[in-house]
Image: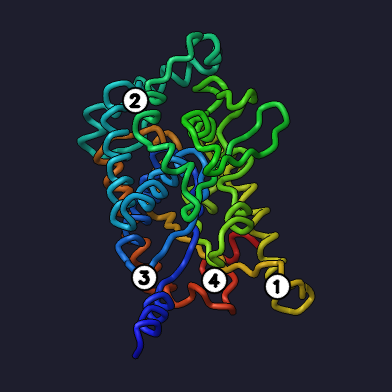
Amino acid sequence: MTKENVEKTVTSDKKHISIAMQGGGAHGAFAWGVMDRLLEDDRIVVEGASGTSAGGMNSASLIEGLIKGGNGGARAKLNDYWREMSALSKKTSPYQLNPVDKMLKYYNLDRSFGYFFMGTLQQYFSPYQWNMENKNPFRDFVSDFFDYQAIRESKEKKIFLGATHVKTGKIKVFSNDQFCTDALLASACLPFLYQAVKVDGEYYWDGGYIANPAIFPLIYNCKARDIILIQLTKTHVAEIPHTATAITDRLKEITYNGCLVHEMRAIHLITKFIDSGIIKDPSVKRMNMHIIKNEDSFKGLNLSSALNTDWDFLQYLKEEGRKSADHWLKQNYDKIGSNTHVLDEVTFDDFV
């Protein structure tokens, strides 16, 4: 076998993918675990990442790590992000587990004084009133943690951050050449917690309201025909919510998944048209969609836990993500790159 043939064989053994990661605060540690396991497999090559909020932070860590150190570098950067973010939150965040709940491994914050206090405060005052100077210790951390120039200059590894344009309600996608501290913070700007973030003269809120995450940038801008979506927000619930908190949580879950459902339906429909020959235009790219999720990992957790950055909790979610990715790889690895694949069957009914 010639050297050229060996190189072709090595290349053909690789699975080229893009990653889409939902937001969800601390729940993003589940996606960290998924990526940690996927990146252990040297056959996996990640071309691009699209994320919102915590998914945006994961995407930035992933892409910078890949640029500087390949799969191993990405694993290390993701680990550093979550460890340092947790340490910062322990010093500065009002959202802390009480000692009893920490001991009992009750990871929801609904029995936390800080959570109750901030919830009450936000009912009557906006961040423009109770935080008039717009102080955000997370800004300094994000500003120092990422190598913005390296990501802006990258042509091979691509990033897409979703944010909501406040005035128009439309999606804004920040890509490599626009990657900056403000773009990251805009993607993660919860409007009752932070003042809208200004980027190039325009104001933005968290991207989860309009795209959680955006899939289309990966289709239009990446060569990879396979996209793995890491879903954090619950699709199904076992019971009808009755308490005010449970109803609020469920409405948020439906909202955060709403735009994703619409986009996935569109992708599925176009794929069916391509496969049936209705669409014959070769410029319309056929995509393979894959989803890694595990709602059992979030069983017993309400949305208050998304503000819990306790290291033990993050480690729990990471391990759950690793286990879910390991199971997915064993069941679906061969489907990556398959021209007959549309959507992982186990999650098909969630969207269409």
- Residue picked out by circle 3: 43
- Residue picked out by circle 2: 112
Mark positioned earlier in the residue sequence (2 or 3): 3
- Residue picked out by circle 4: 345
* Between 282 and 185, the one nearer to me in the picture: 282
Q: Position of residue 198 (x, y in %)?
A: 58, 23
Q: Position of residue 230 (x, y in %)?
A: 47, 55
Q: CA distance from mark 2 to mark 4?
A: 40 Å
Mark positioned earlier in the residue sequence (1 or 3): 3
Image coloring type: rainbow
Q: CA distance from mark 1 to mark 4?
A: 15 Å
Q: CA distance from mark 3 to mark 4?
A: 23 Å
Q: CA distance from mark 2 to mark 3?
A: 44 Å
Question: In the rendered image, which quarter is residue 270 located in?
Answer: bottom right
**Cβ–Cβ under 8 Å for marks 1 and 3:** no
Q: Is residue 302 visible?
A: no
**Disc on res. 272:** 1
Q: Nearer the viewer, mark 1 or mark 2?
A: 1
Quarter holding the N terminus is bottom left
